[in-house]
Amino acid sequence: MSTAQLSFDIDALIHQAAVETVPTWDGAPLRYHEQYRTPAELDAAWERWQFENGSFGCVPYSHMWHSDKYRRGEEISIGAHQHASFQADARCDGGRFGGPEHDHADGELPNDLIYQFICSRCRWHTISNSENAAVEAWHDHVLPGWRDLPVVPKKLAEHGGERTKLARLQSWLEEYYPAAWQASGFPIISERNTYGTRHVPGGSPWGGYSLSDSVLRPGND
């Protein structure tokens, strides 16, 4: 046996001993589920699964909810409401990932990438296989009436972070958007072409979403 293999085996034994000594898990399920759980509970379950099984391949192997905050930006707070986003790879591939231990039953998983948005202060959540649908449901919960906001013209919405263009956008918003909607975490609706359909987190000047009008109003390119 090589020194490297011996070291690997010892590390595995130490890890197994550590797993066996921790208290029995009684938190959120260590698998895909659609129960309401707080962001903290989902984070704790994700960390526990990785502690027991390792981080390699943890997304497809576990099918668990994991925080998407690094891709979507920081959490949003609007009044009494909060925004936290999670994603789960709930695709079943017939056992290619995880080999024989990948033992869920046929039909147990949605067989798709699944998105969950949570407002923990209200104990509210929405789950969808469409990221945009989850974004829209969260805005329906937090900001009724957002669908009636004016659409920001494409030439203003595509500012690219340039100072002059941002100033023009800000001036337009001050003129056309209700004053109450010009606040931290609030969205804008931006004119898009057919291919720019994603609702973009952090795309609003106030840190909220830049929502695509092409998704909300099909046919409006």
Image (spheres, grey):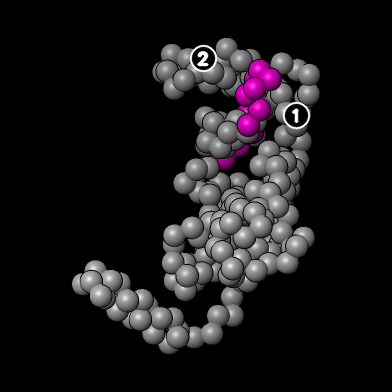
Q: Residue 54: x, y in percent?
A: 44, 67
Q: Amino acid at mark 1?
A: Leu
Give the residues drawn in magenta, as a range.
181-198
Q: Residue 144: where, in percent of width, then height?
A: 76, 40
Mark 1–mark 2 distance (CA, rounded to whole Å): 24 Å
Q: Residues within 10 Å of mark 2 (few under 14, many from 20)?
A: some
Quadrant where the C terminus lies?
Answer: top right
Q: Decide whether residue 219 is among the magenta residues.
A: no
Q: With 158 as the anchor, is 133 left or right in this view?
A: right
- Give the left or right position of residue 79, taking residue 56 as reference: right
Please tell me whether the stretch drawn in magenta is mainly helix, strand or loop.
Answer: loop
Circle 1 SS class = helix
Between circles 1 and 2, the one closer to the viewer is 1
Residue 135 position, x and y percent, is: 67, 42
Q: In the rendering, at what x and y percent does residue 193 appear?
A: 66, 18
Q: Is residue 39 shown to the viewer in this render?
A: no
Confirm whether residue 16 shows in the render.
yes
Task: Answer with the quarter of the image where residue 63 lies.
Answer: bottom right
- Look at mark 1 in the image and give the residue it sits on: 216
Q: Looking at the picture, does residue 11 appear above or below residue 31?
A: below
| Residue occupied by mark 2 | 168
Q: Amino acid at mark 2?
A: Arg
Q: Residue at x 63, y 33 (%)?
A: 199
Which residue does the image show at 66% across and 57% down from the upper left? 94
| 189 in magenta | yes
Give the quadrant of residue 148: top right
